[in-house]
């Protein structure tokens, strides 16, 4: 349970002070996809300078209230988009992030390096980075990977919910046994250009294979601890234990079905209900949310809380160490959120809970800011050291035959 009363108020106030100095670097927010689904990128209809709580988890006033100082905007496209359609949709997602930066320059600023993140913090603006969610976005092309990096994408999640030709997903049947030879070449090329390898969504075999290949820090942009909630989207302890040797960062997510064991089965039935109504199970359009609400009214939902997420962070800190954890809420990419973390304004509640549990201010600063910035900086350093290597033009057909 979240504490109440004067003590809790004091903790929240202290959390806000901490976040003013060391704001949240959030690893994953699906606002671009929500804007695509809801209004086809018509930013006049979803003006995030104003309260959008009726439709979205995210707007600028709530980002400010939540103490967010840097956001990796997910330029996700669904994995049922394939080939050039996936590439084009990813470019459209990148474009809407660019539109947001141009529309709200007093609040949001483009960031592609760790120095950019620090400069944004000093300037009081929200550093805006991008992460591509799923290797289908590059259509098996290392040149396309490099083009996304040139456009500002600073991580790529190797898969989404489905396998791709060269990597296995956590929520699909085993395919190539983790990473194929081409998949390992993708990781090497990401290291060379300075793009973080994101291991959320991938199978545990893929996690281990990528960690064996990568010479730069990896991240998990939005995954929690499998030992606390046994869901394949979460990180096994042996993988968490590899992060200190790699320098990587596991960013705990808030999605109830990934953090609360009781929510796993309930969400499976809710997803089936969505499909029965002809809707994609991940949809968060107004029509989809009405279907969700009706299902929830008839089938009360197990509710995750701030404490649920804190339990994951406690475990992840114990196994991986304080230097290797962060936060990736997955706002606007999930229909449901924990109590106390309903939207992007909720981060102070989580920090207050961690302070209540005895986390030091230094530990909190690492969790919210330092670890993610350091991982990107280290990836940049690795990329500089690899510039003697020419760009790879290897193909899937050449390596995976």
Image (spheres, rainbow, N blue to C red):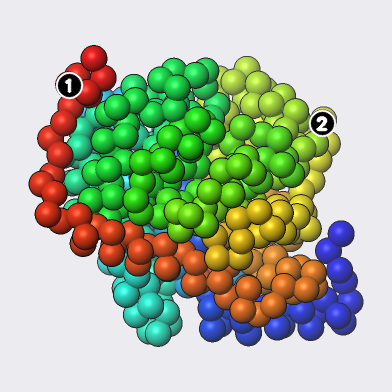
Residue 356, picture quadrant: bottom right
In the rendered image, which residue does mark 1 sit on? 398
Mark 2 neighbour density, 10 Å: few (under 14) some (14–19) many (20 or more):
few
Residue at 30% from the left image edge and 67% from the top image edge: 113
The residue at the far top in this view is 401
Mark 1 neighbour density, 10 Å: few (under 14) some (14–19) many (20 or more):
few
In the depicted view, which residue is nearer to us: 357 or 274?
357
In the depicted view, which residue is nearer to us: 110 or 184?
184
Indicate the position of residue 15 as horizontal and vertical percent values. Answer: 68, 78
In the rendered image, the quadrant that contains the N terminus is bottom right
Using residue 10 as the reference point, say whether residue 291 is left or right of it: left
Residue at 56% from the left image edge and 82% from the top image edge: 20
In the rendered image, which residue does mark 2 sit on? 299
Using residue 283 as the reference point, say whether residue 336 is left or right of it: right
Residue at 66% from the left image edge and 34% from the top image edge: 231
Indicate the position of residue 106 as horizontal and vertical percent values. Answer: 36, 78
Work out how far the residue at label 2 is from the one at label 1, CA to CA, in angstroms: 51 Å
- Badge 2 or badge 1: first in the primary sequence: 2
């Amino acid at each position: 349970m979240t504490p109440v009363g004067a003590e809790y108020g004091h903790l929240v106030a202290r959390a806000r002070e901490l976040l003013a100095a060391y704001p949240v670097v959030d690893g994953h927010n699906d606002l671009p996809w929500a804007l695509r689904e809801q209004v086809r990128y018509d930013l006049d209809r979803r003006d995030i300078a104003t309260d959008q709580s009726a439709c979205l988890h995210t707007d600028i006033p709530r980002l400010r209230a939540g103490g967010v100082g840097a956001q990796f905007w997910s330029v996700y496209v669904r994995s049922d988009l394939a080939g050039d359609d996936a590439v084009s949709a990813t470019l459209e997602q990148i474009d809407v992030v660019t539109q947001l930066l141009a529309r709200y320059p007093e609040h949001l600023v483009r960031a592609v390096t760790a120095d950019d993140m620090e400069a944004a913090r000093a300037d009081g603006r929200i550093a805006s980075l991008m992460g591509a969610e799923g290797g289908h976005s590059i259509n098996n092309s290392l040149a396309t990977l490099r083009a996304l990096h040139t456009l500002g994408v600073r991580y790529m999640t190797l898969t989404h919910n489905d396998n791709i030709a060269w990597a296995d997903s956590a929520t699909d049947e085993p395919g190539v046994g983790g990473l194929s030879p081409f998949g390992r070449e993708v990781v090497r090329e990401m290291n060379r250009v300075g793009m973080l390898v994101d291991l959320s969504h991938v199978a545990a075999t893929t996690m281990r294979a990528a960690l064996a290949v990568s010479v730069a820090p990896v991240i998990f942009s939005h995954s929690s601890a499998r030992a606390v909630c046994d869901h394949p989207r979460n990180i096994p302890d042996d993988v968490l234990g590899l992060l200190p040797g790699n320098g990587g960062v596991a960013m705990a997510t808030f999605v109830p079905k990934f953090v609360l064991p009781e929510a796993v089965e309930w969400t499976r039935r809710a997803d089936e209900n969505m499909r029965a109504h002809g809707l994609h199970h991940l949809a968060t359009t107004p029509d989809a949310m009405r279907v969700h609400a009706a299902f929830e009214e008839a089938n009360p939902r197990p509710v995750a809380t701030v404490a649920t997420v804190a339990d994951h962070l406690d475990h992840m800190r114990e196994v991986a160490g304080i230097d290797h954890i962060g936060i990736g809420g997955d706002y606007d990419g999930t229909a449901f959120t924990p109590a106390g973390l309903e939207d992007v304004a909720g981060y102070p509640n989580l920090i207050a809970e961690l302070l209540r549990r005895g986390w030091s201010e230094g530990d909190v600063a690492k969790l919210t800011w330092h670890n993610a910035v350091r991982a990107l900086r280290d990836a940049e350093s690795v990329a500089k050291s690899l510039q003697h290597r020419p760009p790879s033009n290897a193909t899937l057909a050449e390596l995976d035959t």
